[in-house]
Image: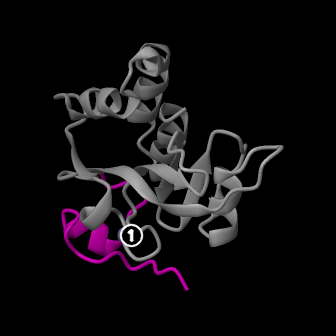
């Protein structure tokens, strides 16, 4: 489930229209082999105009604790059991997970929890793949720090992981 946490993240950003749109198209995109790719297409269109910054595995991987942004970032988590199926969305220091009703603050403990199941405890290893949805023309009412609002995704967000 990648799309639902993304919709929650967009809601937190206060882009309700984009959040609703993503949710309405969720069935469709969850069936697609590449749900994140689908979300990129949904949000890239003329209606929303988000651009997607893609982080792949290895050298260019998202450093989740260092590279914070007020823009929603969908992250596929690599777990200590070798799997990379679980998705979360981060917005600032908040983490949205489809198994939690409320957002949780970013922490090693919480990412470990996201990587675990009821029966097996696993550890968060790295961001396997991530996509940050940046908007070049953010609306006034959106929840963005000045660096994220004016920096077009290139300035360092004011929020820092301690
Ligand atoms: Zn920011």
Where is residue 64? Give x, y as percent: 44, 67
Q: Quadrant of ligand 1?
A: bottom left
Which quadrant would the C terminus be assigned to in this image?
bottom right
Is residue 80 visible from the viewing direction of this image? yes
Residue bearing mark 1: 63
Q: Local crowd at mark 1 within 10 Å, few (<14), some, or many (≥20)?
A: few
Which range is magenta? 138-162
Residue 19 lies in quadrant: top left
Quarter of the image with the N terminus is top right
> For this rendering, which residue is in front, 122 or 2?
122
Q: Residue furthest front?
A: 82
> Could you say where residue 101 lies in the image, as x and y percent from the top left?
73, 43
In-image side of 120 versus 52 (left or right)? right
State the predominant SS element of the stretch in magenta.
loop
Residue 158 falls inside the magenta stretch: yes
Res. 142 in view = no
Q: Is residue 139 left or right of residue 11?
A: left
Residue 159 lies, with reference to residue 91, above or below; the image says below
Q: Residue 96 in the image: x percent, y percent?
A: 59, 50
Q: Secondary structure at mark 1?
A: loop
Q: How many marks?
A: 1
Residue 112 picture quarter: bottom right
**Which residue is farthest right?**
119
The residue lying at 30 percent from left, 31 percent from top is 37
């Amino acid at each position: 489930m990648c799309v639902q946490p993304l919709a929650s993240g967009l809601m937190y950003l206060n882009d309700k229209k984009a959040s609703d749109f993503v949710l309405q198209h969720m069935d469709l995109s969850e069936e697609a082999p590449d749900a994140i790719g689908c979300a990129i297409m949904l949000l890239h269109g003329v209606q929303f105009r988000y651009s997607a910054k893609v982080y792949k595995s290895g050298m260019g991987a998202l450093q989740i604790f260092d590279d914070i942004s007020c823009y929603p970032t969908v992250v596929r988590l690599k777990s200590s059991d070798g799997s990379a199926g679980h998705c979360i969305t981060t917005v600032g220091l908040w983490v949205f997970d489809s198994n939690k009703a409320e957002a949780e603050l970013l922490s090693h403990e919480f990412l470990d929890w996201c990587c675990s199941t009821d029966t097996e405890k696993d550890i968060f290893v790295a961001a396997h793949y991530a996509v940050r949805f940046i908007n070049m023309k953010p609306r006034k009412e959106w929840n963005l720090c000045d660096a994220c609002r004016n920096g077009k995704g290139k300035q360092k967000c004011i929020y820092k992981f301690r």
